Image (tube, rainbow, N blue to C red):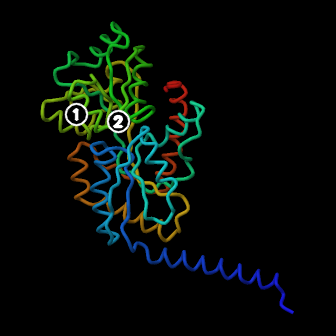
Amino acid sequence: MINVRATFRIAVAALLCAGAVSVQAQATDYPNRPIKIVVPFPPGGLADTVARPVAESMSRELGQPVVIENRGGAGGGIGMAQAAKSAPDGYTLLMALSSYSVLPEADKLLGRSPMYAFDALTPIARFTADPTVLAVRADAPWNTVKDFVEDAKKRPGAINYGSSGNYGTMHVPMEILAQNAGIKLTHVPFTGAGPAVVALLAGQVQALSTGPATVLQHVKAGKVKVLGHWATGRLESMPDVPSLKDAGYDAQYAQWSGLFAPAGMPEPVLQKVRAAAKAAAADPKVKQVILGAGSPIQYMDAPEFDRYVKQDIGRMADVVKKIGKVE
């Protein structure tokens, strides 16, 4: 008589074994088709500026096309959520900014379910870590941070600034400055840094905080001037610009860019992606493009970047609480 239970157990074991062999075979064969890097912002911002040369270098390293998909919205949350929900097979990656550390905490503060969980994404490599800069149009009436702050004190809420969205990398530093200086500014969110810079150039907003790479070309063209930055020393790309601390305001913020992957990738795939990212960070062509845009490479490999991100999440949780609810 046939033992039905025993036959069923054998069949299940065979399926599981076949599945494991299939996953291992896919991992060994990786990559055998194009890879996508999700940039959770429109073209023109820091994430896009970094992702494009990195993608070209990784394509050469991996032997497959690495394409960019710009998926903006919700301060980067929509694109990051898309990447977090993707299959962990190495064919969908994410180039995130430091808003990654903020948005789930902001969602909790607002009583919403987070768009993504921190443990749904695995840090692969950090490429840049720049302080943001306070940029205004060249014809703006302010020439120093103190000019800007004093005017804001006289006219509460009259000065507006653009950002990439609520709690994003352009919103948070401005709120840090506003709290520290005791001023009220009007926040105008856009879908990314690119549209916010266009709005600044068009006079639709009067100021913004963004990475040096986003505005350096406009500074060189005489269309934008930078009043200060959120670091403690001097910027390599803008050595004559003082820090906010130099102006008497204890406001610091760094906008980093880094590559992530959906959690749970097979180890052989993870190692190949990690090696390709490391090669991209050392690629002279990548360094030249990103430095030319105003952001030197500040590479961190996966283990160090993972620790850095966890620390950043802790720091940003306190900042979000101080900012409070922003609908």
On the image, the x and y values in percent for residue 322 come to 52, 24
Crowd band around label 1 with a 10 angstrom C-alpha radius: few (<14), some (14–19), many (20+): few
On the image, the x and y values in percent for residue 102 come to 49, 37
Calculate the distance from the C-alpha at mark 2 to the C-alpha at mark 1: 13 Å
Residue of label 2:
131
> Which is nearer the N-term, disc 2 or disc 1?
2
User: Residue reaching furthest left?
Assistant: 221
Crowd band around label 2 with a 10 angstrom C-alpha radius: few (<14), some (14–19), many (20+): many
On the image, the x and y values in percent for residue 285 come to 22, 58
Nearer to us of marks 2 and 1 is: 2
Q: The N terminus appears in which quarter of the rendering?
A: bottom right
Please, is residue 202 above or below residue 68 in the view?
A: above
Quadrant of residue 287 in the image?
Answer: bottom left
Judge from the rendering whether residue 287 lies leftward or rightward of residue 119; answer left or right: left
Residue at x 43% of width, y 73% of height: 30
Kindly state the secondary structure of the residue where label 2 is placed: strand
Q: Nearer the viewer, residue 232 or 188?
A: 188
On the image, the x and y values in percent for residue 195 come to 29, 36
Judge from the rendering whether residue 11 lies leftward or rightward of residue 132; answer left or right: right
Please, is residue 170 above or below residue 118 in the view?
A: above
Residue of label 1:
239
Kindly state the secondary structure of the residue where label 1 is placed: loop
Please, is residue 54 above or below residue 166 in the view?
A: below
User: Residue reaching furthest right?
Assistant: 1
Quadrant of residue 135 in the image?
Answer: top left
Judge from the rendering whether residue 141 lies leftward or rightward of residue 155; answer left or right: left
Give the residue type that dot 1 points to.
Pro
Please, is residue 322 above or below residue 264 in the view?
A: above
User: Residue reaching furthest bottom?
Assistant: 1
